[in-house]
Image (cartoon, rainbow, N blue to C red):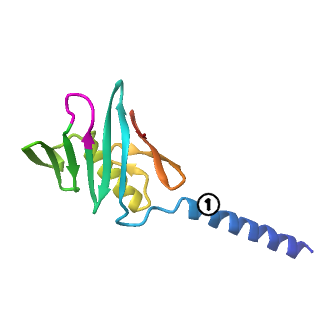
Amino acid sequence: MKKIIALICAAAVFFSLTACTEQNKPPAKNRTYSFNAIYTTGDFSFDCSIKWKNSVAFITVNSTNARGLTISCDGKTVTFSKDSMIKEMPTDSIDKTNPALLLYEVFTALENGKSRTSLGAFDITYSEDEIKTIKLSDIVITRV
């Protein structure tokens, strides 16, 4: 009888651990994300569109005086573009809090099953299978 109870307990633990593992499984490589969000850092925020495709993070500002500015990061280069202006800079010359560089690090970490960037650990909440919020330091990105 003791062996049966021990076996049932072991099976229960196994199934509960595999259920948790499945829910927290990192997203598949090359998954595409695209959503509108509010990007907040300290007491400043702006509306934006966020996209992750082919290992490139894009953030387009939809409010403030920077409306229409798109910043992208492929891990090597950060590109700023608005209308006919295009400026490329190597990532090592960009501040680590740059939104596109930060999102590149977050999405790359997610694909690799990690939860840290160069700015530290981040936390993501989901609603069903969609990202609801990304929190890191004093930065909060909230899907709208």
State the residue at coordinates (57%, 64%).
22
Q: Is residue 19 magenta?
A: no
Mark 1: amino acid: Cys
User: Quadrant of residue 40 in the image?
Assistant: top left
Residue segment shown in magenta:
60-67
Report how many numbered discs are placed on residues in the image.
1
Q: What residue occupies the far top of the structure in this picture?
A: 43
Residue 25 lies left or right of residue 141; in this view the side is: right
Q: Which image quadrant for residue 2?
A: bottom right
Return the x and y of residue 104 as percentages of the image width and height: 29, 52
| Residue holding disc 1 | 20
Look at the numbered disc 1 and give the secondary structure of its residue: helix
Helix, strand or loop for the magenta stretch, by majority: loop
* Residue drawn at point x = 61 percent, y = 60 percent: 20
Q: Residue shown at 32%/47% (left/top)?
A: 50
Location of the N terminus (image quadrant): bottom right
105, 79: nearer the viewer: 79
Residue 112, percent across and down?
40, 62
> In the orientation shown, which residue stands out farthest toward the right?
1
Whether 24 is drawn above or below 39: the answer is below
In magenta segment, residue 61? yes
Task: Please tell me how crowded label 1 is: few (under 14), some (14-19), or many (20+) other residues with Cα within 10 Å.
Answer: few
Which corner quadrant holds the C terminus?
A: top left
Image x and y of residue 58, in percent: 26, 49
Position of residue 12 relative to residue 80, above or below, is below
**119 or 125: nearer the viewer:** 125
Please tell me which residue lies in front, 97 or 133.
133
Q: In the image, what residue occupies the spot 46% across and 61% down? A: 26
Judged left or right of residue 45, residue 114 is right
Q: Is residue 95 left or right of residue 130?
A: left
Left or right side of 74 for 7: right
